[in-house]
Amino acid sequence: MDIIVSDIIALGIIAFLSALILYFVSQKFHVEENPKVEEIEQILPGANCGACGKAGCYNFAEACAKANAKSFKTLYCPVGGASTMKKVADALGFKAEVKEETVAVLKCNGTCENAPAKIFYDAPVSCRLAHQISVGQTGCPDGCLRLGDCVSVCKFGALSIHPQTGIPVVDENKCTSCGACVKMCPRGLFEIRPKGKNGQRVYVACSNKQKGAVARKNCKVACIGCMKCAKICTQIKVENNLSYIPVSVDAEEFGSELVKNCPTGAIVMTEAKKEKGHD
């Protein structure tokens, strides 16, 4: 009986000392949380998509709370956009930077019509798996696989597979430029680009690096690296049989001419949006 009592006393002393040690350790390493973190987190959309470059909204809120006026300019929440960043800036007493709105763009126009299926694919419905084991139904090693991995990772319902064309369609009114589709696509077919003045964007809707004749055999609107676009605008570069139009190229100035002179129709330009109040 005495042994049991002594054991209980010993355990009690050990528990007390352990608690005491934990208390002093917690006091020594205690970090006061900035109350601004919770306030900012409440302002953020809560998507936790990582588009801001942080692990989630809480981590982004922490970065904002720790930032100074200069470093705050490097922080941006694509999902919340300018309105959210203004609220965050107001909460911190900073001035929000005005940034151009962006949207995801698909650099492929290999529709069912432009690039008919030549190979029967009977395997798991996954772009990533298909990319590893097959060149794709169209025969284009760089084209859209049409299996919808991008659609499945979009948290905002901004992507869908068009029932007629077979390729993804971006709803720019829902797209937040989170970059999930960019990361998911095994062929790197998505790019985040500025929406452009009045919504006008000009870009090469092709990623095929095959030589002209082979590229056209797989897709009739493939870029053939003919250099005509580069002669119209010197900012355009053609490498590996593929043209690339930088975001700095003014769609209003060069767009129409680039589209008109592209022999295959690989260059596309979005229509200008009508200003409110005008027909």
Image: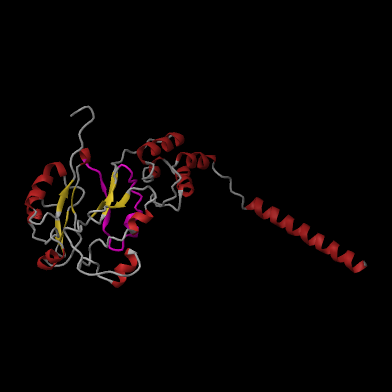
Determine the image quadrant of residue 215. bottom left
For the residue pair 134 and 24, the one nearer the viewer reads as: 134
Disc tally is 0
For the residue pair 104 and 20, the one nearer the viewer reads as: 104
Q: What range of the chain is rendered magenta?
A: 173-196
Question: Is 87 situated left or right of 230 in this image?
Answer: right
Residue 92 visible in the snapshot: yes
Determine the image quadrant of residue 194. top left
Q: Position of residue 5 (x, y in %)?
A: 89, 64
Q: Where is residue 210 in the image (x, y as percent from the top left)?
A: 16, 67
Judge whether 268 appears above or below 90 on screen: below
Which residue is rendered at x = 56% and y = 45% of the image?
Answer: 33
Which residue is rendered at x = 25% and y = 69% of the image?
Answer: 120
Judge whether 235 appears above or below 97 on screen: below
Judge whether 197 appears above or below 222 on screen: above
Question: Is 219 situated left or right of 84 in this image?
Answer: left
Q: Residue furthest right?
A: 1
Which residue is rendered at x = 7% and y = 54% of the image?
Answer: 231
The N terminus: image quadrant: bottom right
Question: Is 64 situated left or right of 179 in this image?
Answer: right
